[in-house]
Image (tube, rainbow, N blue to C red):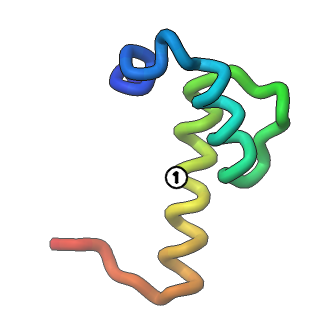
Amino acid sequence: MHFWQQAWQEEQRLFFTQANMALPDLSTENTDFDSVFEAMLSQRDRIKETQQLVDWA
């Protein structure tokens, strides 16, 4: 999240627009990096389950 905050400091609006559209359960008004991170983890778990993937060792 720290990287996102630094990398997107100047373009936060673009970052949140793209993240909110791409990830589950985020409102279009979301501007919270923690929420984006949680949604990313949720999406990762969903893809892992539906694709029957295993974690790298």
Q: Residues within 10 Å of mark 1 (few under 14, many from 20)?
A: few
Seen at 16% across and 72% down, the residue is 57
Q: Position of residue 11 (x, y in %)?
A: 55, 18
Residue closest to the eye, 26 or 16: 16
Q: Position of residue 33 (x, y in %)?
A: 57, 25
Q: Position of residue 43 (x, y in %)?
A: 59, 60
Tell me where residue 56 sits by quadrant: bottom left
Q: Is residue 6 above or below residue 34?
A: above
Residue closest to the eye, 17 or 35: 17
Which residue position is annotated with label 1?
Answer: 41
Q: Quadrant of the N terminus?
A: top left
Q: Residue furthest top?
A: 10
Direction from residue 50 to residue 7 in the image, left or right: left
Q: Residue furthest bottom?
A: 52
Residue closest to the eye, 47 or 57: 47
Residue closest to the eye, 52 or 29: 29
Q: Amino acid at mark 1?
A: Leu
Q: Is residue 54 above or below residue 57?
A: below
Tell me where residue 34 sits by quadrant: top right
Seen at 60% across and 37% down, the residue is 36
Q: Position of residue 6 (x, y in %)?
A: 38, 15
Q: Is residue 29 above or below residue 25?
A: above
Direction from residue 18 to residue 4 in the image, left or right: left
Seen at 63% across and 41% down, the residue is 19
Secondary structure beneath label 1: helix
Seen at 59% across and 19% down, the residue is 12
Direction from residue 45 to residue 35 in the image, left or right: right
